[in-house]
């Protein structure tokens, strides 16, 4: 993901900084169960965070699967990085 960000910003140190900020915010939301939608009836939680840099938005998306009856099939996962 850092290399993908670097393709856009053309500065590896800045790409690392952007990813670190994204990941830190993302893990904070995972740890505190801060989801995109605050609907408790939805079993799969969506997590989203973003960083704005140079008129671009770098977004990290993830999901927490909690609805599967087999405990080992429930997980937290980073789903995608979007840049717009």
Image (cartoon, helix red, strand yellow):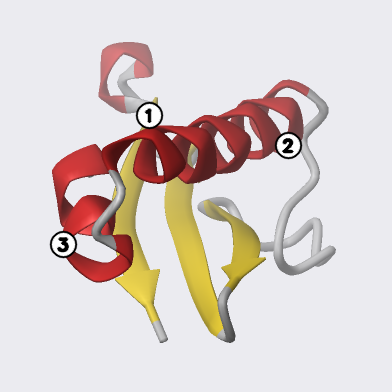
Q: Is residue 30 above or below residue 10?
A: above
Q: From mark 3 to mark 2, how far is it between C-alphas?
A: 27 Å
Where residue 47 sits in the image (x, y, percent)?
59, 52
- Circle 2 is placed at which residue position? 29
Q: Earlier in the sequence, mark 2 or mark 1?
A: 2
Q: Nearer the viewer, residue 68 or 7?
A: 7
**Label 2 packing within 10 angstroms: few (<14), some (14-19), many (20+):** some
| Element type at mark 3 | helix
- Circle 1 is placed at which residue position? 69
**Label 3 packing within 10 angstroms: few (<14), some (14-19), many (20+):** few
Q: Which mark is residue 7?
A: 3
Horizontally, is 39 left or right of 9 in the view?
right
Q: Quadrant of the N terminus?
A: top left
Where residue 60 sits in the image (x, y, percent)?
46, 55
Q: Which mark is residue 1?
A: none
Q: Earlier in the sequence, mark 3 or mark 2?
A: 3
Specify the farthest residue to the top.
Answer: 72
Horizontally, is 62 left or right of 25 in the view?
left
Residue 33 image-quadrant placement: top right
Residue visible at 80% across and 66% down in the picture: 39
Horizontally, is 80 left or right of 56 in the view?
left
**Label 1 packing within 10 angstroms: few (<14), some (14-19), many (20+):** few
| Element type at mark 1 | loop
Q: From mark 2 to mark 1, how far is it between C-alphas?
A: 24 Å
């Amino acid at each position: 993901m850092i290399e993908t960000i670097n393709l856009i910003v053309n500065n590896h140190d800045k790409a690392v900084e952007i990813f670190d900020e994204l990941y830190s915010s993302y893990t904070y939301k995972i740890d505190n169960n801060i989801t995109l939608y605050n609907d408790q009836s939805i079993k799969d939680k969506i997590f989203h965070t973003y960083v704005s840099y140079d008129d671009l938005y770098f977004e990290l998306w993830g999901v927490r699967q909690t609805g599967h009856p087999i405990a080992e099939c429930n997980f937290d996962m980073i789903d995608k990085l979007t840049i717009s």
